Amino acid sequence: MAHGKNSQGARVTMKDVAVRAGVSQSTVSFVLNGMEDMRISPDTRQRVLDAAAELGYRPRSAGRPPASTGLRVIGLMFDEVATSPFASISIEGVQEEAWKHNVLVEVVMTGGDKGYETAILRKWAADRVEGVIYGSILTRKAALPEALSKHRAVLLNCYDPDTRFASVVPAERRGGEEATRFLIDSGHKTIAFISGEPWMEASDQRMEGYERTLRAAGIPVDPSLIVEGNFLPSGGREATLKLMARGQRPDAIFCANDLMAVGCYEALKELGETIGKTIAVMGYDDQEIAQHLSPALSTVLLPHREMGQWCASRLLESDAKDSHQERMECPVVPRASHLRSGE
């Protein structure tokens, strides 16, 4: 999602324009990039242009620096890009920040193949790229190829156990804490949690944040209110049915990602519940679908765009010598699913 800023300095994304115009982000991209060969009606084109003007959207090219004679490049290496939307968001964050410096980004997807990673890193060394961003689709400890040490490098959504490189990851525990505190502040006391698969660091840390906040608020952690899911709608639905069949009925259900919240919605509606009134639901990730659920899902933002921007800035604006780990805040995005009856 390319983005600009409105006159007040707030970020306006293509997603915002798409929601205002009632079209897909692809339609917005085609219209704003002047692709006249696409079969988009004049009315739709005008709706997109009007929405962009109303929101103060400015395209990524606005205000870009003049082209220089030397071509500067950084490399961005991801293990996967097609299994979730987060890789593409991170890539755009890297590109946007790099382009401010008149630097291009060369992106490769390796599938985690260490031989392929090594070959690409050797090519980039021969090409004299200015730096490398090594990224992971899952937040995890990374087994890094030795050839990475030949580059100025930073790690995106992963970290080096030997702390040789600076890295940025989401502050998942704090995200779990913020979401749980938000539900408590909204008046909920009996808060259930649907986890992801336990081998995932993100799932474990989100649950740890949930438990910490309950204890800090003087609310006992009840194991019967914690059910394992699978980060998919099917797991959210099954876990919700289990929770609602147990003796203690929850006031709110905190799902460890938005896709499980989709399944949670399905189960609650099957049971005749009114989300946002008789029971609250909280998600995590702020995926595109969150704002289109009914009611719109309160959730937690994963800052993948900001993490990508941080990596590019780190490579291009500093000496990148220290190897500290940046934990980026995951703020709550309040919508309507957390409300209590009568609010």
Image: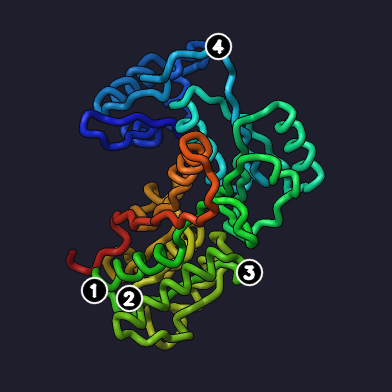
Residue at horizontal 47 percent and vertical 72 percent from the top: 207
Q: Relative to 296, say whether 61 is above or below.
A: above
Q: Nearer the viewer, mark 2 or mark 3?
A: 3
Residue type at mark 3: give it.
Answer: Trp
Label 3 element class:
loop
Residue at horizontal 32 percent and vertical 22 percent from the top: 47
Disc nearer the start of the sequence (1/3): 1
Determine which residue is flagged by label 3. Answer: 199
Q: Quadrant of the N terminus?
A: top left
Q: Residues within 10 Å of mark 2 (few under 14, many from 20)?
A: some
Determine which residue is flagged by label 2. Answer: 251
Outermost right residue: 115
Residue 189 sits in quarter: bottom left
Spatial separation of the CA atoms under disc 1 and disc 4 = 60 Å
Residue type at mark 1: give it.
Answer: Gly
Spatial separation of the CA atoms under disc 1 and disc 3 = 32 Å
Disc nearer the start of the sequence (2/3): 3
Residue type at mark 2: give it.
Answer: Asp
Spatial separation of the CA atoms under disc 2 and disc 4 = 62 Å
Q: Residues within 10 Å of mark 3 (few under 14, many from 20)?
A: few
Label 4 element class:
loop
Q: Position of residue 156 (x, y in %)?
A: 56, 48
Determine which residue is flagged by label 1. Answer: 187
Query: Is the residue under label 2 in contact with that under label 1 (CB below 8 Å)?
Result: yes
Spatial separation of the CA atoms under disc 3 and disc 4 = 49 Å
Q: Relative to 115, say whether 65 is above or below.
A: above
The disc placed on residue 82 is none
Determine which residue is flagged by label 4. Answer: 69
Label 2 element class:
loop
Q: Position of residue 319 (x, y in %)?
A: 52, 40
Disc nearer the start of the sequence (1/2): 1
